[in-house]
Image (cartoon, helix red, strand yellow):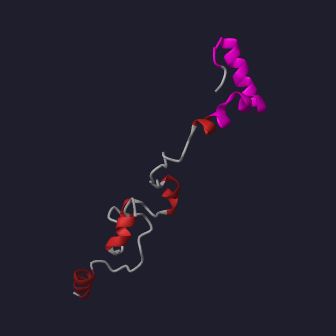
Amino acid sequence: MAFRFLSRTFGCLSVLPPLRPSITPSVRQLPFRALEADLVSHGALTTHPALASMQLRFSRRNTMNGATRLLQKRRSGFLARKRSKTGQNILKRRLKKGRKTLAW
């Protein structure tokens, strides 16, 4: 009789959290501004330590970061290719293939 009463009022006798992640995660209520700031809700990502390496964090990439022709020439121009060993290999490969333009 007492067990039936306890199970009806509390739902479960255990007060310890489950060891396995549940389907319905217990998410604490956050103010609206905090939820608005997050790109992914807290309930969407699991917090189980075994699945920590599989978590994905989403954010936008900065595509307007000021890439110019100057930067392009600095990174992949002829002189940049001549400076490094791998760059020299790229120039040799393009020369052997008969490319008109070896680098920027």
Of the pair 76 and 59, the residue shown nearer to us: 76
- Residue 48 in sight from this viewpoint: yes
- Mostly what secondary structure, the magenta segment? helix
Residue at (64% x, 33% y) in the render: 73
Decide which of 78, 19 is in the foreground and name it.
78
Quadrant of the image occupied by residue 36 = bottom left
What is the magenta range? Answer: 73-101
Q: Percent x, y for residue 31?
A: 34, 75
- Judge from the rendering whether residue 30 lies leftward or rightward of residue 80; answer left or right: left
Quarter of the picture holding the N terminus: bottom left
Residue 84 in view (yes/no): no
> Is residue 84 located in the magenta-colored stretch of the structure?
yes
The location of residue 33, given as percent across then percent down, is: 35, 71
Q: Quadrant of the C terminus?
A: top right
Q: Report the number of numbered marks.
A: 0
Residue at the limit of the structure toward the bottom, as seen here: 2
Report if residue 42 lies within the magenta region: no
Report the front residue among 84 and 30.
84
Q: Is residue 20 left or right of residue 80?
A: left
User: In the displayed structure, would residue 59 be above or below residue 41?
Assistant: above
Lateral position of residue 47 relative to residue 4, left or right: right
Q: Quadrant of residue 34?
A: bottom left
Residue depicted at 54% across the width and 45% down the height: 66
Q: Which residue is found at the position 49% from the left and 46% from the top?
A: 64
- Lateral position of residue 99 relative to residue 19, left or right: right
